[in-house]
Amino acid sequence: MRLVSLLPSATEIVYALGLGDELVGVTFECAVPPEHRAGTTIVVGGRDTRGMSPGEIDAYVKGQLAAGSDLYTLHAGALAGLDPDLILTQDLCRVCALPSGRVADAVDHLGCRAEVLSLDPYTLADVLDTILAVGAAARVPDRAEALVDALRGRLAAVRAAVAGRHRRRVAVVEWVDPPFGAGHWIPDLVEAAGGEPVATHPGARSTPTTWAALRAARPEVVLVAPCGFHLDGAAAQAAGVAARFPDAEVWALDADGLIVRAGPRLVDGAEAIAAILHPDAVPAAPPDAARRVA
């Protein structure tokens, strides 16, 4: 089977299922191991936002959306040349990837025979179900079931380790300019890690808020996990956030690796948050996962 992934989280699922050799097309943001780069073609491009501040990125995104423009460009000719059997896409977030409708229209126009599977999880349970869906569509359902069973086992182990302990109030900042309170599956990660999520939107889209509203939620721990940033970038932004929460612990998280991409590594994120909230109950997080800034 020839697979094309149009979002980074789906690419991570493909590799976790052992299907890297069948992945022929990816986006410019997907993490592809060196040994597979020669065999994959970039079929989706977009603006390189490195060097832009969070406020500049927000203004660019709002401007594109207001103009009715896509944030990503599908290289239709490259896609057609790959002759894919299965294309993985999404409708969850226009900021994260092309919507599935654009992909389906392109496939029809090109006369491709590919199946288009849209992955649109809103909760942690939904994310695990998408892994099963990819496994079924890629004809490896047994691998997907084994992977999901292992992930559920790790989540159960975290919950057992923190059961009965005091649940500190946790706010997760998913963007800093303007501030966004976290939504989707992120509150589920905090709950699984033994925290009480506050100023969040469980199972719903993340939305802009204010620093005053976040402070009013009285968080004891603030986790800064800006979408699109790994730990160093998150830590640089968390340093500015810390001054707004003098009475709380402030931590930076590897957002792209552990928090915002709807794939298997979300369980790593739950484990890292548990290590922050209950360091005497669970193993310490890897040094590239989390960093305390205040």
Image (cartoon, grey):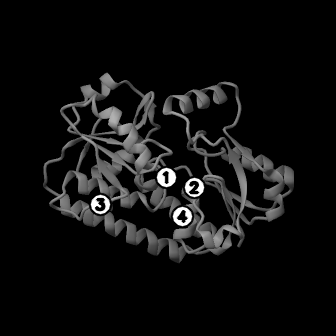
Question: The N terminus is located in which quarter?
Answer: bottom right
Task: Tell me the kind of residue under disc 2.
Answer: Pro
Task: Tell me the kind of residue under disc 4.
Answer: Ile
Task: Tell me the kind of residue under disc 3.
Answer: Ala
At 23% from the left edge and 47% from the top edge, which residue is drawn? 195
Calculate the distance from the C-alpha at mark 4 to the C-alpha at mark 2.
9 Å
Q: Which residue is the site of mark 3?
A: 285
Q: Which residue is the site of mark 4?
A: 13
Numbered disc in front, either 1 or 3: 3
**Spot occupied by residue 277 in the image (x, y as percentages of width and height):** 21, 51
Closer to the chain start, of discs 3 and 4, is 4
Q: Seen in the image, is 139 located left or right of residue 276? A: right
Q: Secondary structure at mark 4?
A: helix
Q: Which residue is the site of mark 1?
A: 261
Marks 4 and 1 in Cβ contact (< 8 Å): no
Closer to the chain start, of discs 3 and 2, is 2
